[in-house]
Amino acid sequence: MSPRRSAPLSSRKEPQQARSANLVAAVLEAAVQVLAQEGAQRFTTARVAEKAGVSVGSLYQYFPNKAAILFRLQSDEWQRTTTLMRGILEDEALPPLARLRRLVQAFIRSECEEAEVRTALADAAPMYRDAPEAGEARATSARAFRVFLKTVLPEAAGPTRSRAGDLILDTLSGVGKAFSDKPRKPAEIEAYAAAMADMFCAYLVGLGALPEPAPPARRLRVARKRG
């Protein structure tokens, strides 16, 4: 018996004109809504086309099946996460630990905002985690973090920085997913992210990173006491 071929995951073609790009955008937006509101069980190309207000035939011009739509959504999510991480970690206008703090806050907030769709994607297509695009997204994030840690821990040995990067990224990903598994209020998200950032920053300071500058109000109080 010949091996069963998996459904194609790539799009049929990329839109070249504004009208085509708008159609693809409408399909992807509708796909997110179907996933979030109805779950993976009711996710079909016909349902997505209906939600988007386009014909199934028009949808098939760009996506051969529902697997291709789901994979596009997942790929876009990987890209957003990678872009978010690199944009924050490479922002030299901020001190290194302030960048890490901002990254943690943005990541946890994003995990909570996209929890419904992410969970539905995981239920609908768990095999996507092993796709080459997933590996590339993880590798890109890891490279960006390695470069960042060279700035944070310039005197640390390579294995120490590598271990620190793995620990922070694995914890951020795993805890972020667990925390976002149920609805959270904005204040709860901010408090939790701040506590996690405190933990990471204290860990890196223990490894030799320069401490975060004290907030202006605190510096003023210290100066007054010394005066």
Image (cartoon, rainbow, N blue to C red):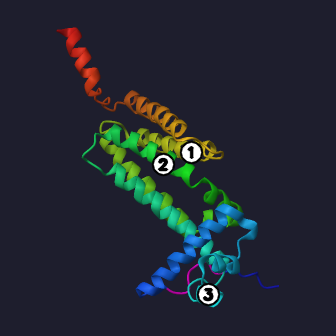
Indicate the secondary structure of the residue bearing disc 1: helix
Indicate the secondary structure of the residue bearing disc 3: helix
Q: Can you see residue 61?
A: yes
Q: Position of residue 122 (x, y in %)?
A: 66, 60
Q: Farthest residue toward the left?
A: 227
Please check the rendered image and state whether residue 179 is part of the magenta-colored stretch, yes or no.
Answer: no
The residue range painted magenta reads: 8-13
Of badges 3 and 1, nearer the viewer stands: 3
Name the dominant secondary structure of the magenta segment: loop
- Amino acid tagged 2: Phe
Q: Which residue is mark 3?
A: 60
Query: Which quadrant: the N terminus?
Result: bottom right
Label 3 or label 1, whichever comes before in sequence order:
3
Horizontally, is 222 left or right of 121 in the view?
left
Q: Position of residue 21 (x, y in %)?
A: 46, 82
For image coordinates 59% across by 77% down, the residue present is 52
Label 1 or label 2, whichever comes before in sequence order:
2
Depth order, front residue of 168/218: 218
Give the numbered dot on residue 176. Answer: 1
- Amino acid tagged 3: Tyr
Q: Which residue is mark 2?
A: 107
The CA distance from mark 2 to mark 3 is: 34 Å
Horizontally, is 64 left or right of 76 in the view?
right
Q: Tell me how many marks there are.
A: 3
The CA distance from mark 1 to mark 2 is: 8 Å
Q: Can you see residue 39?
A: no
- Amino acid tagged 1: Gly
Indicate the secondary structure of the residue bearing disc 2: helix
Label 2 or label 3, whichever comes before in sequence order:
3
Rendered image quadrant of residue 4: bottom right
Disc 2: CA contacts within 10 A as few (<14), some (14-19) or many (>=20)? some
Depth order, front residue of 191/197: 191
